[in-house]
Amino acid sequence: NAGVMQNPRHLVRRRGQEARLRCSPVKGHSHVYWYRQLPEEGLKFMVYLQKENIIDESGMPKERFSAEFPKEGPSILRIQQVVRGDSAAYFCASSPGQVNTEAFFGQGTRLTVV
Amino acid sequence: GENVEQHPSTLSVQEGDSAVIKCTYSDSASNYFPWYKQELGKRPQLIIDIRSNVGEKKDQRIAVTLNKTAKHFSLHITETQPEDSAVYFCAARASDSWGKLQFGAGTQVVVTP
């Protein structure tokens, strides 16, 4: 029973490049959440998706960031034209539902922008 | 929206002593309060959670208490061991928040032998 799988674990990008982070939820989970953790800080909610739908993107920066969760395949968090301030750990969590359910986190992708 | 405050930011305890971490929340609609343990470079792992219809929950050396009136909840670790050293995060989730968690800033717990 595989948990939430994220890849890559580590990603280095130069300023101006694009970063694509992938998240495969626990099998059977249809709810995916992305969180960002800056160094020595807590996790901040970014976006909540269900299959083919963005439900809540209130935590997403207005520009350069986008997320999708297609009918087939993993959820993708895309950051265009990365800047140094995007360096962080990005965690994906999945759950089988919204309420009365636990969220299980993946190992995270550590993005470093050089 | 929800705001979660967590204290202290760092906590040093002697092995065998107890550790207590406290969190407060602002949204009275919050009804689910998980605690996560995160070791350096690893994922946050759920260690215990409590729902708003319960005042206290215990799992071996870990317990969580919830005071809905005062809007605060606490994590208690008894008989601490070196492997309890980690960053602990509290979180809150409101029933109308699409399931998203609002996290506290974290507490670095160091257990010294």
Image: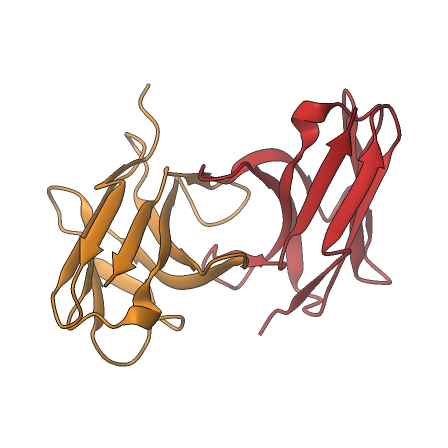
Chain colours: A orange, B red
Residue beneath the point at 75% across and 23% down: B81
Number of marks: 0
Whether residue B56 is visible here, answered yes or no, is no
Whether A67 is drawn above or below A71: the answer is: below
User: What is the x, y in percent for residue A86?
Assistant: 31, 67
Q: In this view, does B51 lie above or below B60?
A: below
Q: In this view, does A35 lie to the left or right of B110?
A: left
Q: In this view, does B14 lie to the left or right of A90?
A: right
Q: Which residue is drawn at 37% across and 52% down?
A: A89
Residue at the spot 78% in from the left edge and 46% down from the top edge: B11
Quarter occupied by residue B84: top right
Q: Please tell me in which quadrant of the rendered image residue B42 appears.
A: top left
Q: Position of residue A81 (x, y in %)?
A: 15, 73
Which image quadrant for residue A38? bottom left
**Residue plotted at (66% across, 48% down):** B33
Residue B93, percent across and down? 58, 56
Residue found at the far bottom of this picture: A62
- Is residue A108 shown to the viewer in this render? yes
Q: Closer to the camera, A104 or A14?
A: A14
